[in-house]
Image: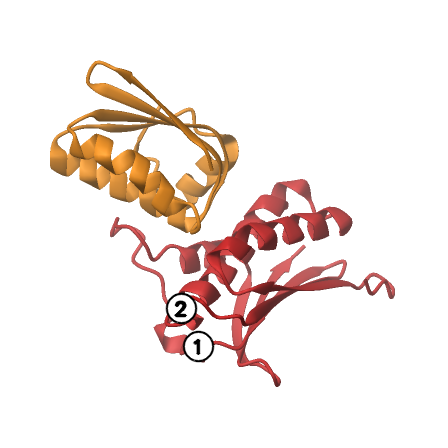
Chain colours: A orange, B red
Amino acid sequence: MTYKVTDEGDTSTVFLDGEIDMDKTEGAKEVIFPLIDAGKNVNLNLSNVQYMDSSGISVLIESHQKALEKGTKLIVKDVSKSVLKVIMMAKLEQILNLE
Amino acid sequence: MNTEATNLSEKKDFLVRSSSLKDVRSFSREVFEKFKIDENLREELVLAIAEAAQNIVKHAYKDYPDTQDRMAVRISCTDKELEIAFFDKGKPVEESKVKHRAIDDVKPGGLGTFFIQEIMDSIKFKEGDKPWINNLVLTKKL
């Protein structure tokens, strides 16, 4: 997994790349959580993530809940078809902010 | 590969590590390509296999992150059914403790087993023949 972060005002956009599994979740959290802790709104762009398993889904849930606690917003953007299928299997399409 | 009639089977072993999961997925994708499994089914089958392998790493070897043990994955296919078997030498699985979280209780974790149940038609935990301890068998009608 690789990533890129861009900033615009109080919003950071995190572009994740590759396949997100148990081996990659700590890396994803290390990128996303400090931004939320710093009070930023976070756009998580998943257009280049082709695969995500239950560990990756847990990162989405944890990030979403952390943002709620901090009074910021996490938006999951440009989700690839394959990852959307997994999000829907977990019945999270109404819980997460998807765009 | 066994090519008798329409029975196909491929088996490979992997070091029990989270870093092996990408290799488990690659192996599964290669086998599904070779077995000409319906493309619409392939990625969800890969997810089920990866979740089961992840459970071995996370649960059967919970206290042994630096183990040198290997786990094996065998994918077998007939015209009508796909069977995926997992073999490991970790802590014996207590089937009564294998359950997913309630799906409407949204919190991190507890989804791997749910995904496997959603994707596959049957899940059977068996005692492994020596030297294996656990033998999980997943099936899917084709």
Crowd tier of the residue under label 2, counting other residues whose Cα lies within 10 Å: few below 14, some 14–19, many 20 or above: some
Which residue shows up at 19% across the image and 25% down it? Answer: A40
**Helix or strand or loop: what does disc 1 sit on?**
loop
Q: Position of residue A43 (x, y in %)?
A: 31, 25
In the rendered image, the vertical position of residue B101 relative to residue A81, given as above or below? below
Quarter occupied by the N terminus of chain B? bottom right
Q: Dividing the image into 4 quarters, which one contains the C terminus of chain B?
A: bottom right
On the picture, is B7 further left or further right than A54? right
Q: How far across and down, in percent of the image, does residue A26 sit? A: 35, 46
Is residue A25 among what the camera can see? yes
Instruction: State the image coordinates of residue A72 (x, y, percent, origin top left).
Output: 16, 28
Q: Which mark is residue B13?
A: none
Q: Residue furthest bottom?
A: B130
Q: Which disc is residue B59 wearing?
A: 2
- Front residue of B42 and A21: A21
In the displayed structure, B97 sits above or below B106; it is below
State the residue at coordinates (43%, 71%): B61
* Viewer-nearest residue: A71 or B82: A71
Q: Amino acid at mark 2?
A: His
What residue does disc 1 label?
B93
Quick check: marks 2 and 1 in contact, CB under 8 Å? yes
As displayed, is residue A60 above or below residue B72?
Answer: above
Q: Judging from the image, what secondary structure is the residue with disc 2 in? A: helix
Q: Is residue A57 visible?
A: no
* Residue A77: quarter of image: top left
Q: Residue at x 48, y 70 (%)?
A: B67
Amino acid identity at mark 1: Val
Image mark 2: chain: B
* Letter of the chain that mark 1 sits on in the rendering: B
Same-subunit check for callouts 2 and 1: yes
